Image: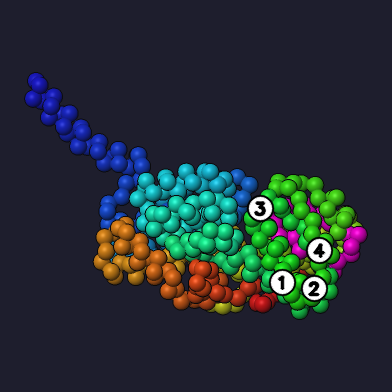
């Protein structure tokens, strides 16, 4: 009887082992290639996170459908950090526990900056599709280059400089004002770059008004700006805040042309009346009206899969996955053990040598791992986001 019981228990244990592996932490064989995706899939900035996740997953699924890496399918592990830096740090360690070989993310700047130092210590290859703060790849205060971190988006200073140039050269503006979020690195970075460039090119900045993070009332700041009557108003923040600012700006009597950065993308999705933002311009990395074949192919594939038009964040995430996987292919040629230090370093080296055509343009990297690429200018015309051109 005891013999039969032992045999039965042994068989039960053997049968259950695979189930435990499937139901617990994502298990990984040492030669599996597991890509982590971290971002805010719920919460205030989920619209960005979901677009990034969808764009990255689309490229990975297309890659797997085409045969994968030497016939092996790439795996994906996801983590929702809800736009919170502390949760992003928890998420990073969760991905490490899941044996990821590389990470796409995070999405906004502060959560990304929270995990980058950990990634550097682990020599973890990382690429963000949308975290634009300069400090994501280089900490000026400590002179630290996060050599493991790359991005497919341009950086905050680039956007601020670009919009100052655009105001002066294309809009013939002579005066400007800025309203910005004093508690957000993205907003501060764009503001500082805009003001610096404006000073250099003779665009007079008449006012710089700040507001607290998560503020919803901007009337006082906008009234002060309206009294100065600037030609343009630069408002570097995310779409939900811009929807509020634009309406209150018109109520304050401001007639200035509003300008912004890529955080404006999808602003029309949260506005029932687009009139307050009509005639505005913002910097972006992509437009659905770009007739380049690769852009139109991506647009068709994304729309078919998700039943919606892809925004800039989805396009940049598609490129981020493309850049990362091309580097993984190069690392595979070295025959280093998957996930080893040498393997991770090979991915990082291959990413640094990127020279490819993506959906958002031709991409190479500078010495700080920031992409060298052109910008797209979007204008709000007749209640629609229209492709103005590349600048």
Q: Residue at x 17, y 28 (%)?
A: 9
Q: Quadrant of residue 340?
A: bottom left
| Earlier residue among tags 4 and 3 | 4
How crowded is the residue under tag 4: few (<14 C-alpha within 10 Å), some, or many (20+)? Answer: many
Between 241 and 168, the residue placed more toward the observer is: 168
Q: Which residue is labeled 4 in the image?
A: 177
Q: Which residue is mark 1?
A: 197
Q: CA distance from mark 4 to mark 3?
A: 18 Å
**Element type where label 3 sits in the image:** loop
In the image, residue 114 above or below residue 286: above
Magenta span: 226-250
- The percent coordinates of residue 178 (x first, y second) are 78, 61
- The answer to whether 157 appears left or right of 318 in the picture is right
Residue neighbourhood size for the residue with mark 1, other residues' Cα within 10 Å, grouped as few (<14), some (14–19), many (≥20): some
Instruction: Name the element at disc 4.
Output: strand
The furthest residue to the front: 142
Q: Report if the CB atoms under discs 3 and 2 are less than 8 Å apart.
A: no
| Front position in the image: 218 or 39 | 218
The figure's colour scheme reads: rainbow
Where is residue 120 shown, x and y percent of the image? 43, 57
Task: Say which quadrant the N terminus sits in.
Answer: top left
Dot 2 and dot 1 residues touching (CB under 8 Å): yes
Between the residue at mark 4 and the residue at mark 2, the CA separation in whole angstroms equals 10 Å
The label shown at residue 184 is 3
* Residue that carries the numbered disc 2 in the rendered image: 203
Spot occupied by residue 187 in the image (x, y as percentages of width and height): 68, 57
Q: Residues within 10 Å of mark 3 (few under 14, many from 20)?
A: some
Distance between the Cα atoms at labels 2 and 1? 8 Å
| Residue 52 visible (yes or no) | no
Magenta segment: does it hold 248?
Answer: yes
């Amino acid at each position: 009887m005891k013999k039969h019981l032992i045999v039965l228990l042994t068989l039960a244990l053997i049968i259950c082992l695979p189930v435990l592996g499937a139901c617990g932490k994502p298990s990984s064989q040492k030669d599996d290639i597991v890509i982590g995706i971290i971002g805010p899939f719920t919460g205030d900035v989920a619209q960005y996170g979901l677009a990034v996740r969808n764009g990255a997953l689309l490229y990975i699924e297309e890659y797997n459908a085409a045969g994968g890496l030497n016939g092996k399918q790439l795996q994906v592990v996801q983590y929702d950090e809800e736009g919170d830096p502390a949760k992003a740090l928890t998420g990073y360690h969760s991905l490490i526990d899941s044996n990821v070989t590389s990470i796409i993310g995070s999405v906004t700047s502060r959560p990304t900056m929270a995990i980058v130092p950990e990634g550097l210590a682990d020599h973890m290859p990382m690429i963000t599709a949308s975290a634009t703060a300069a400090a994501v790849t280089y900490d000026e205060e400590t002179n630290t280059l996060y050599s493991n971190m790359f991005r497919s988006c341009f950086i905050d200073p680039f956007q601020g400089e670009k919009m100052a140039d655009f105001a002066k050269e294309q809009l013939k503006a002579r005066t400007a004002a800025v309203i910005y979020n004093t508690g957000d690195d993205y907003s501060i970075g764009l503001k500082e770059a805009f003001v610096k460039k404006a000073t250099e090119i003779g665009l007079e900045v008449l006012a710089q008004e700040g507001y607290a993070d998560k503020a919803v009332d901007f009337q006082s700041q906008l009234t002060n700006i309206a009294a100065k009557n600037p030609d343009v108003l630069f408002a570097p923040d995310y779409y939900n805040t811009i929807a509020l600012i634009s309406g209150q700006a018109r109520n304050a009597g401001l007639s200035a042309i509003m300008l912004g950065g890529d955080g404006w993308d999808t602003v029309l999705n949260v506005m029932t009346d687009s009139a307050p933002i009509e005639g505005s311009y913002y910097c972006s990395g992509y437009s659905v009206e770009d007739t380049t074949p690769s852009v139109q192919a991506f647009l068709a594939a994304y729309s078919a899969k998700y039943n919606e038009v892809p925004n800039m964040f989805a396009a940049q995430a598609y490129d981020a996955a493309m850049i990362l996987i091309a580097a993984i292919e190069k690392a595979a040629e070295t025959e280093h053990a998957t996930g080893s230090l040498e393997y991770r370093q090979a991915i990082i080296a291959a990413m640094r040598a990127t020279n490819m055509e993506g959906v958002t343009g031709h991409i190479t990297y500078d010495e700080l791992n920031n992409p060298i690429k052109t910008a797209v200018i979007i204008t709000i015309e007749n209640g629609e986001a229209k492709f103005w051109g590349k600048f």
